[in-house]
Amino acid sequence: MRIVLASQSPSRASILRSAGVEPVLRPADVDEETIQAELAGHPPAEIVAALATAKAEAVAPDVAGATEGDGDTVIIGGDSMLLLDGELQGKPHTVDNTIARWRAQAGKQAELLTGHCVIYGDQRHVETARTVLRFAPISEVDIAKYARSGEPLQCAGAFTLEALGGWFIDRIEGDPSSVIGLSLPVVRRALYSFGFNASDFWENS
């Protein structure tokens, strides 16, 4: 039994490894900006789900057994974005963008949306996890140093929970694993819907 992760995110892979699964990594190459532009005006949860689905479907044709449902391969695509003041925020990519983002979100409440598409054969489980976050008030010195650390540049919402960013998150309401990048409860529900147990995919089961 194997799980193929259609992502290059170290955090998503780490979540699965911590949960007893060694994923096969197949990063997907999709045009995220085009997908978001085509879905402009759609509900935010639908947009992140569409991005996750595009990633999972992009790698499916190249993964042996994935489309036949031969009993051993499940593909997971995921995407996360922060909903702040009614607008979706993706990865900041640059230090300057990260500083601006943190000046805007410090002390505020936001919602992290993590879209999932789990594929087994011709079956799909598509679900978006929602987690409410309360960002701490954060000093200008910490904003600048955090941005320059490089850690948040490729992270949705310009933060991490499991590393330096943990200093600046005051409260979480929801599934912590989805904040890191992949909701284990969502994946469990998907596996159950396909007739699997979560433990079927554990390395030492």
Image (cartoon, rainbow, N blue to C red):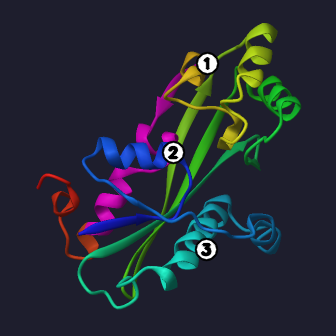
On the image, numbered disc 1 is attached to which residue? 168
Q: Which mark is residue 10?
A: 2
The location of residue 196, given as percent across then percent down, is 20, 70
Proximity of marks 3 and 1: CB atoms separated by less than 8 Å? no
Regarding mark 2 in the picture, which secondary structure is present there?
Answer: helix
- For badge 2, the amino acid type reads Pro
Q: Closer to the N terminus: mark 2 or mark 3?
A: 2
Give the residue drawn at x 20%, y 55%: 202
Q: In the displayed image of the protein, which residue is found farthest to the left?
A: 205
Magenta-colored stretch includes residue 58? no
In the image, is residue 115 above or below residue 191?
above
User: Which stretch is magenta?
Assistant: 168-191
Q: Closer to the N terminus: mark 1 or mark 2?
A: 2
Q: CA distance from mark 3 to mark 1?
A: 32 Å
Q: Closer to the N terminus: mark 3 or mark 1?
A: 3
Residue 175 shows in this picture? no
In the image, is residue 149 above or below residue 201?
above
The location of residue 153, given as percent across then percent down, is 73, 36
Q: Which mark is residue 149?
A: none
Regarding mark 1 in the picture, which secondary structure is present there?
Answer: helix
Mark 3 neighbour density, 10 Å: few (under 14) some (14–19) many (20 or more)? many
Regarding mark 3 in the picture, which secondary structure is present there?
Answer: helix
On the image, numbered disc 3 is attached to which residue? 54
The location of residue 161, given as percent across then percent down, is 53, 29
